[in-house]
Amino acid sequence: MNLNTQQTLLRIELDLRHKPELLVACQAVVRFLSEHRAEDLQQITFGLIGRVANLPLIETIPVAEYLSSARGRIFDRRFMLIVDEEEFEIPHEDVAEARLLNRLCHPDTGEVISNFEESLFVYFELSDIGKMLTRTFD
Amino acid sequence: MVWERQLTTPSAQQQKSKELILFWLNSLRLRQFSYSFRLVQAQLKAAGMPSASGWDSLFEKYQALKYSEIDCTLYLNTVIEIYKNSLISSNAAIWLYEAPVESISAISTWAQKLINKKSVFAKTFPHPVEDEELNLAPFNGEFINFETLSNGDLVFYSCAKRAFRHRESIEVDQLEVPARKALIGYDEVFGIKSGFTQAYDRVVVRIESGLMELHIDMCCPLAADDLHQIQVYYTEKFKVFLKSLTCSFLWLNQSKNLFPKITELYNAVDGQIIALGHSTSTKSIKEERMRNRRQDLRVETFHREGINAIPSTDLYSIKKGWTMSGWSHVPAVLIPGKASSAGAVGSSVRHALIEACATPEDFEFVVQKLL
C-alpha cells in the first residue's frame, strides 16, 4: 500500500468517522484501487462499487457521492447517452444545460431526445488523485 | 432614388443572405441520418460561426442573428460547403470495383449520357424535393448530376426515395388527459414513425487508379438485403450503359473482396480498433466493442490478455477508426463479416460501411485503407 493510499484512508476516516458504514465502504473501495492498475479501471459503475464494498446497489450512491465530492476527490462523474445501442459521452456542462432546459439533443441527428434522463448512464472515472492510488507496478 | 437604393440595398441583401443561409441549413437538417450534427457543429465553430446543441436552437440562433453585423458571404459559403460535404462524404455502404482503363475512359467521355435531367430530383438538386414530390418519386435511383473533382476523378450523384420506419418514445406526461387515462397501466409508450427520405447515392470513378466506387447513402437504416438490391440495381444500370458504348462490363460482376482486409486492418498499428468479431480456437464467438471510439481494443486488458491466453482466433468482422486532427472526429470503417466466415476457405465480404467522415478527404482516406 503506497503512501498516497495510507493518507487517503486516514483522510476518509477523519471525514466519515461519524458514519461507520459509509467509512468502511469508502475504505474498501480505496483498498481495491490500490490493488489494480488505472488502465483497468476506466469505467467504474455503481455495480462495481457494490461488489467491492459488499453493498446492495441502492446503498452505493452515498459511497459514490463521497468519493466524487470535493472532499473525496477520487472519482470524476461521467455521463454516457445510450440511444438505440449507440453510445455518446456527454460533457458535464451539456448535461447541466440539458437539465436546466429540460432538453437534450441527439449528438448525431441534432433532434431533441424525449425522456433523455432515462437514456443517461452515469459512471465514474478515476480523477488524477484517484489514479495515484492505483497499482503502478506488476 | 439613389439615396433610397443606398439605404435599402444592403438591407435587402442581408435579408436575402438570411433566407439563403436558413434554406441551406434546412436542407442540411434533412441529411441528419447520414451526416452527423456534430460534424456540422465542428465546421460552424471552425469558421467562427454560431453553433448550438441541436437543430431547433441552431435555427433560433440564425433567425435572431443580426445579419448587418456578420460577413454574410463567409456564412453562406460555409453553410454551402458543409451541405456539399454532407452529400459527398455521408455515411455510406461502399463497394469497390477494379475497372479496365477503356471502361474508365468511356465513362469519363460519355458521363453526360448517364444523366437524366428530366428526373424530378434534377429540378431541385442539390436540394431535396418537397415531401409531396418525394411521395410520388421512384424508389430506383436516377443519375441527375456529376462533377469533376480537382484531381480529375468523377462523382455521379443519384437520388432515390427510401422508405424508413423508426421507433420513438412518447412522453405520456405531455399528452392530453383522455390520452393519459387511456394509457394507464403502461410503463413505456412508443410510436412508430414511417415515411420517405431522399437518398443521395454516389458513384465515384477514380481516373488514376482505375477504381469505381459505389456509395449507397445510409440516409435511413438499410438491411443487408436492401443494400444488395440497391447495389445490383446500380451495377445493372452501369452494365447497360457500358454495353451501349460497346465496352467491357464483366468486371462489374464482382466487387473487391474485403474479407482479407479484416486481418490487415487489425494488424496495422495505425488507428483504433473500435469493434471486433472473432471465433476462438477454444470454440467461442467473441463480439467485442470499445465504448469510446477513441480507444483501441487491442490495448484493452481483457482483450489483450484473452488473445494471449489462447492458441489462435479467426477474425470475421472489424470496425476501425482514425482520429483526425482539427475537429478530432473519428472517421471509421466497418467490414461486416459473419461468424460463419471465420477461418473458412473462400470467405468474402463485398461491402463496407464508412461513417463519420466530415469531408471528401476523410472519405477518401478511409477508402484508401481498403485498397
Image (spheres, rainbow, N blue to C red):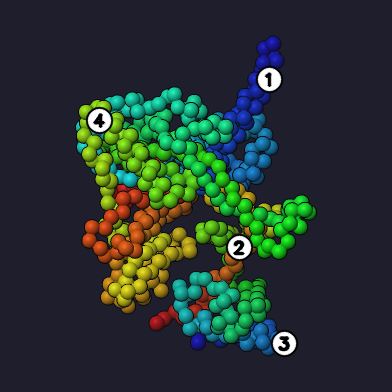
Q: Which residue is mark 1?
A: B8
Residue B243, labelled with which disc? Answer: 4
Of the two numbered discs 4 and 1 on the same chain, state the one appearing first in sequence. Answer: 1
- The x and y percentages for residue B144 are 42, 29
Q: Which residue is mark 3?
A: A18
CA–CA distance in space, label 3 to label 4: 87 Å
- The x and y percentages for residue B110 are 29, 26
Q: Same chain for the residues at labels 2 and 3, yes or no? A: yes
Q: Is residue B323 above or below residue B59?
A: below
Which residue occupies the extreme right position in the image?
A: B177
Q: Along the line of sight, which residue is nearer the eye, A88 or B285?
A: B285
Residue B368 visible here = yes
Q: Which circle, 1 or 2, is nearer the viewer?
A: 2
Dot 1: chain letter = B
Is label 3 in contact with label 1 (beta carbons under 8 Å)?
no
Amino acid carrying mark 4 in the image: Lys
Q: Which circle, 2 or 3, is nearer the viewer?
A: 2
Question: Left or right: where does residue B79 sit relative to residue A39?
Answer: right
Residue at figure coordinates x 40%, y 66% from the top left: B287
Quarter of the view holding residue A70: bottom right
Q: Which residue is mark 2?
A: A120
Amino acid carrying mark 2 in the image: Leu
Dot 2: chain letter = A
Residue A7 visible here = no
